[in-house]
Every structure is written in structure tokens, then in C-alpha cells.
Amino acid sequence: MDEKPDVTSPRELNALFQKYGLQPRRHMGQNFLIDANIVRKIVNAAEIKTGDAVIEVGPGAGALTLSMARKRARLLVIEIDRGLTRLLGDLLEPWPQVTILEQDALHVSWDKQVEQIKPGQGNIKLISNLPYKISGPFMYNLFKAKFPFSMAVLMFQKEVARRLVAGPGDPDYSTMSVLCRYYCEGKILFDVSKNVFFPRPKVGSAVLKLVPRRKDLTGKEEKLLWEIVQGAFQQRRKTILNSMDRLFDISRNRLTELLEKVPLSPAARPEELSVGEFAKLTRITYNYLNKAN
């Protein structure tokens, strides 16, 4: 069963690509992982074991996929490239517990896919070596789906990884940081050299582990949280009072009172607010708006 090409070997990967008439497609951001040690570290970080349900996005030539299949994990693999899905179908034929879905990861219905692979009451893990060009929209989609995973181990461009785990006062702190901290606990596990990819990207990578955290807000309040956070960081040099004034038809005096209930200074900048302060401001604003109506 294991007599398969070593897709972490550049020589064997090239031979496999020639056999299937494939080559890396730069416009799709394809960079294939060719380091068995990094593969082991990612799979170990996700604590993959027999029977685990795992969704993998962007499997490429299957370096991570084969490793997890050999551990008898139940896999749903999402790949947009038809040539690669054909290659993966042949490589993964010995493992019937692996399902390959040819689809754009940005148009996945996470509720549907999670339900498809969900093993009874078990948890579902997410693993991905994402094309860097889609990492931002991909993460926003996960947050919109309320991060329906027990764990995610994801490889990003270092800049994106830093932005996801950034905290108040950090230059990288942004809308994405706040939403990530609202839905998840995140930690950068290790950096990855650009030399372990084919073709070699221009930037280094980092592997990030995310686990879900308890949500502080109701569904309707969460929708308002997105509005407040995105509005605040669109003009991050403005005070939170000015941001709220632009977003809502509420007098500045009343807005000042709402901010003081958090408590927040009206002169505070968005990058100074913690996720807890954004959440509390959201709830106070939501309650005020609904009482006013």
C-alpha cells in the first residue's frame, strides 16, 4: 500500500508531474511542500490519530494528505486544480476513507462539509497549506462560519500569521486579529523556510495552531461586532468615538456615555482596544439600539 512516490522528494515530484502533464501554476499560488520533516511537524501538531475526521484544504501533491491517510484519519480533501485531483485520486486509491472534493475553497459551505465528514459526536480538525493569495478571504469565511473545528493547523505567509495572532498595540493588529481572537485562541508554532517549497516562494512561512474559544455574544450581536470592528479599522487613526459616530445615527454625547460604560476613553484608537472591549462595546451598543427602536 505504501509503495507510492515520495512527493516530498523534488526528483520524484518532478517525475510525477511529468507523468500527469502537470507543472506548478504560479497564478494560483501553487508552492508544493517538499520537506518530510515539516510534514511530520504539521501532522504531529494536529495530533492526527486513527479515526480522526480531518478536512484538508489545498493538498497540492498530497504530502500532508498521504501522511494523514497512513494514520487512518478520515479525510475530506478540497482541491480546485483538476489535474491535481486526478493525481491525488490515483495516489490515495488505497485509502477509501479519503474523499476528494474538486472545489474552490473560497466557495465552500463549511456547514455542509463539516456535516458530511462529522463522525457521530466526534470533532473535526482542519489542516491547510494555503495559497497565500487567498489566506485572508479564507480566514474571514471560517470566522463567518463561526470556526466549526476542534482545531486548525494552518500554514501562512509569516506576515499573515503575525496579523492573525497580533494583540492590542501591535503594528499588525487589525480587523483580522480581533476576529481571530474572538473566535479562536491562536499560537504560531514554528517558522518555515521558503527553501522547503517547489517552486520556492519569495517569502517565508509560519505554521499557526488555532483552537475555538467560547463566544461572548449572540448571533445578532456578532453581526454588529463585525460592523464595529471593520468600521473602526477602516480608519484606524481615528478615535473610537469618531468611528462610532460615522457608523451609527447616535448623538456624540450618547456615544460618549456608551463608551464610558465599557469603560473606554472616547479618545482611544481602535488598535488599543482588546477583543473583550470590542465585544463589550458591541453588546452595550446592541442593547441601546434595540431599546431605542
Image (spheres, rainbow, N blue to C red):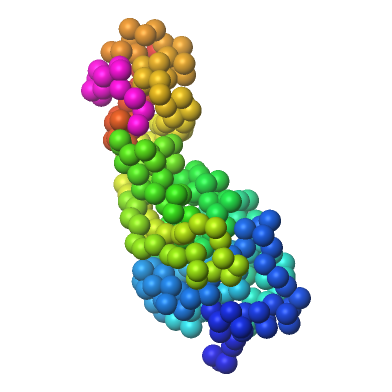
Q: Is residue 123 above or below residue 166?
A: below
Q: Identify the image quadrant of residue 121.
A: bottom left
The front one of 266 and 89 is 266
Instruction: Return the x and y of residue 125 as percentages of the image width and height.
Output: 43, 64
Q: Nearer the viewer, residue 265 or 195?
A: 195
Image point 33% across, 39% down: which residue?
170
Left or right, 134 with respect to 264, comes to right
Q: Residue at x 50, y 57 (%)?
A: 203
Q: How many marks?
A: 0
Q: Quadrant of the N terminus?
A: bottom right
Is 284 located above or below residue 54 in the figure?
A: above
Can you give x and y, in whole percent of width and height, for residue 15 in the image? 68, 83
Residue 265 lies within the magenta run? yes
Q: Position of residue 202 (x, y in %)?
A: 55, 58
Magenta stretch mostly in which secondary structure?
Answer: loop
Q: Is residue 203 visible?
A: yes
Could you tell me which quadrant the C terminus lies in?
top left
* Of 110 and 41, the residue lying toward us: 41
> Which range is magenta?
258-271
Q: Residue 136, image x and y in percent?
A: 52, 46
Does 271 sit above or below residue 245?
below
Q: Is residue 280 magenta?
A: no
| Placement of 158 over or under 231, stated as above or below | below
The residue located at (46%, 24%) in the rendering is 235
- Image quadrant where residue 77 sits: bottom right
Residue beneath the point at 41% across and 37% down: 174
Q: Is residue 116 visible?
A: no
